[in-house]
Image: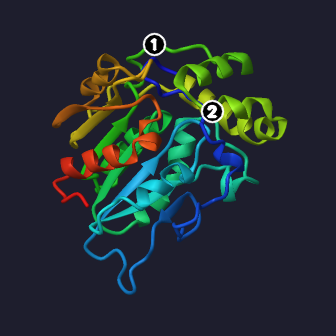
Amino acid sequence: MTTSGTRDAARDGSAGAPAVAPGARPHGTGALRRLGPPAASSPDEGRVSLVCFTYAGGGSTAYTAWSRRLPKALTLHAHVPPGRQERGREPSLGSVDELVDDVLPDVLAVPGPLVLVGHSFGAFLAHETAHRLVQAGRPPEHLFVLGAGAPGLTPLLPVGNDEEIERLWRLLGANPAGLDRPEFRAGFFPALRADLRAHAAFLPPPGRPALSVPVTAVYGNEDPVATAQSVSTWRHLCSGPFRSVEIAGGHFFPQTRVADTVDALVRHLGIAVM
């Protein structure tokens, strides 16, 4: 993980969690899950679509609570990587490029204007997906990177073995109780290790033009690794508007401070908050 907090472990062990929590209904299959209740007709017509990527080892369940907070002008599509949730029988992928190759067709199939959101390791995936969308002639309206520093511009923390992963987990405030459950470790650690390998190996292609879409970097004021300084490194990969925003909370503020996080994002998009 970087000191920006992009290498982390899930607090809730989404590999073994239900695909959807009570109160949210997923729609669609493949690499994205649409969370939230559908409209009776033309459910996504005229709506902005959030495409959300989560922390290392995580899945779409990390954004279930978001679907209850979003205004009606937004839909939410959350990433389900291979090796977790309903894709648990698929082998995990070990590189950022492979993960983006896997999800890109589903992202391109989402109707309406796109806004990409990535938390921690997911910020790498969201940023790379944004570049692919620009190349495809469908640039996103905005990119939000949460609790993460830019790839190649922040130092790594060691996660070469399970002991180092556990230390990082505790540092970030993740759920330590899961570490004592063998069935939890067996279900969650393979996906986590794959994401950590992908993170450790990734560097942006040299000489690639900076991303021209608006970028907002959001960080928790109690995050021990994703500090204001580390998240500001994203400005070096951007040629368009850039700003950083502080949220109260630690590394997992997108899950522990849902209302504050969602409201900040929709305000920056110029959409009325619920």
Residue at figure coordinates x 58%, y 65% from the top left: 22
Residue 234 placement (x, y as % from top left): 30, 27
**Depth check, front residue: 246 or 122:** 246
Tell me if 122 is positioned left or right of 158 in this view: left
**Depth check, front residue: 160 or 5:** 5
Amino acid type of the residue that numbered disc 2 sits on in the rendered structure: Asn
Amino acid type of the residue that numbered disc 1 sits on in the rendered structure: Pro
Q: How far apart, in angstroms, are the residues tagged by discs 2 and 1?
A: 24 Å
Eye-nearest disc, 2 or 1? 2
Which structural element holds mark 2?
Answer: loop
Residue 239 visible to an observer of this rendering: no
Query: What sort of colour scheme is used for the picture?
Result: rainbow
Dots 2 and 1: beta carbons under 8 Å?
A: no
Residue at figure coordinates x 43%, y 28% from the top left: 250
**Looking at the image, is 207 positioned above or below residue 259?**
above
Q: Which mark is residue 84?
A: none
Q: Which mark is residue 175?
A: 2
- For mark 2, does the 10 Å Cα neighbourhood hold few (<14), some (14 to 19), or many (20 or more) residues? some
Residue 116 placement (x, y as % from top left): 35, 49
Residue 177 visible to an observer of this rendering: yes
Residue at figure coordinates x 72%, y 52% from the top left: 90
> Where's the C terminus, which quadrant?
bottom left
Name the N-terminal-most of marks 2 and 1.
1
- Residue located beneath label 1 in the image: 155
Residue 127 placement (x, y as % from top left): 38, 39
Residue 155 placement (x, y as % from top left): 45, 13
